[in-house]
Image (spheres, grey):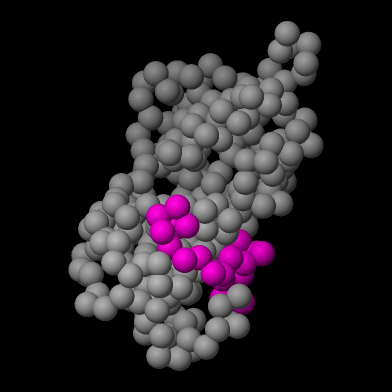
Amino acid sequence: MSTIWITRPEPGNATTTAALQNDGFAVLGLPVLEVRHVIPREGWPSEWPDWVVFVSANAVRGLEAAGLPAGARPRVRAAAVGARTALEAAGHGWNVELVPKSENAEGLLEIMGRVDMRGKRVWIPGGNREGSARHVLPDALRARGAEVVTLGVYETLDRVASVDELAKLNAATPGAVVFHSPSAVDAVFAENAPEEVRRWQGADLVAVGPASASQCRRQRSERVWECTEPSDIALLALLASIGKRVPQEKRA
């Protein structure tokens, strides 16, 4: 019986693992990354922005954990890369106006193209690794006349698996590895990855999002699968379609 490895960091790993287990999949929830919130080295800007652009739920949580005062946030217009990020932002009091159908940087830029950004102050909170929050979005919005401030509010770090976790990886039969970010792909395919991790490199690669899918395809061209949208529902449907659910008789 093959197993699905969920590499997503917490707090999402437990949620996704539970969703798959409840739907009849054999699952191993073992994050390969960890996210730490940090205070922006740049300090807080002196003025509130006209817009804040959230490229991930981690960016929302990082901005909150950094101690941002409630202030005028209900009056700040917000754009979110996808439905999950928008829900997180709204839960913290942000006025989310724009959510693209294509949940990526290109989708954000397309939908924000409907708004005159000349002279607008824009905050883009993000992490320490390369991604749209560091270059693509800031550069594009500056080219359209916006005053953009990038804020480092979280760090994504490789997580070292415990001896017990490596034993669980070694004992399971690799069926599929689920990636929620390109960084997770890099961690599993790292040259110095433990043997217990490397034995999973031949499993099906399942990407939740186009950026993760592109990174998977840099590793190989076959048996790479991409969810139709970044949600647990879409992940469940995809895994079922490629035959990864445990047969009913084995669940009895």
Comparing 190 with 75, the one in front is: 75
Work out which quarter of the rendered image holds the C terminus and state it: top right
Q: Residue at x 39, y 18 (%)?
A: 164
State yes or no: residue 45 in magenta: no
Is 54 situated left or right of 229 in this image?
Answer: left
The number of numbered badges drawn on the structure is 0
Q: Residue furthest top?
A: 252
Question: Does residue 93 sit above or below 234 in this rendering?
Answer: below
Residue 133 in percent (x, y) is at 43, 67
Question: Does residue 36 sit above or below 27 in this rendering?
Answer: below
Question: Does residue 63 sit above or below 136 in this rendering?
Answer: above
Residue 56 in percent (x, y) is at 47, 57
The magenta segment is 89-110
Q: Quadrant of residue 131?
A: bottom left
Q: Quadrant of residue 1?
A: top right
Residue 189 in percent (x, y) is at 50, 43
Is 86 situated left or right of 222 in this image?
Answer: left
Q: Residue at x 56, y 35 (%)?
A: 16
Residue 91 in percent (x, y) is at 45, 52
Q: Does residue 151 appear in this view? A: yes
Q: Residue at x 78, y 16 (%)?
A: 248
Q: Does residue 221 appear in this view? A: no
Q: Residue at x 65, y 64 (%)?
A: 102
Is 133 situated left or right of 20 in this image?
Answer: left
State yes or no: residue 107 in magenta: yes
Question: Does residue 126 sit above or below 45 in this rendering?
Answer: above
Comparing 242 with 97, the one in front is: 97
